[in-house]
Image: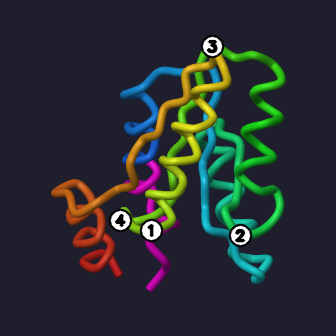
Amino acid sequence: MPHLGKSEDLMALLQNKYQQQPTTHRILLSHGTSITQGNQEIKAIAQKLNANIAYWSIFPYFANIIDNLLNYNPESIAIVPYFLFSGKITETIEQEIVLRSKNTKTKLIFIPPFGATKELAQVIVKQVINN
């Protein structure tokens, strides 16, 4: 069965997250992997979403991407962590965003990961039924 990330329905959920917070720039933040193919797929997803890709554990690091965007003094940046659920990493990401917000006029918007929602459950069920 293909992994969940290949689901067009999951892409629609991500697009909806960004549309709820219209911004001038987008970051899709993934954990990152040493497996090149995994990173290529997340890059493709970010391109479809018109988002900058950033990784938590590999280059290009989240801190570097956000610093680069802040150099342009954008009005706002929406950050979506590409994680199914909240946890220690997403909490750390939120804390970093709060700290960075204090030193910039740019509005930094943290959009929570998918979470245990009806919409995510529907995506999973549809993928299981169709495969």
Q: Main secondary structure of the magenta part?
A: helix
Residue pointed to by mark 1: 88
Of the numbered discs 1 and 3, the one sitting upstream in the chain is: 3
> What element does badge 4 sit on?
loop
Q: Amino acid at mark 3?
A: Glu
Residue pointed to by mark 2: 57
> What element does badge 1 sit on?
helix
User: Is the residue marked by circle 1 packed among few (<14), some (14-19), or many (20+) residues within 10 Å?
Assistant: few
Q: Amino acid at mark 4?
A: Phe
Residue pointed to by mark 4: 85
Q: Locate residue 56: give its quadrant.
A: bottom right
Magenta segment range?
1-11
Residue pointed to by mark 3: 75
User: Is the residue marked by circle 2 packed among few (<14), some (14-19), or many (20+) residues within 10 Å?
Assistant: few
Q: Locate residue 104: give its quadrant.
A: top right
- Residue 22 is inside the magenta segment: no
Q: Amino acid at mark 1?
A: Lys
Give how far apart the Cα atoms at labels 4 and 2 are: 17 Å
Of 47 and 1, nearer the camera is: 47
Give how far apart the Cα atoms at labels 1 and 2 are: 14 Å
- Identify which residue is drawn at 63% across, 19% down: 106
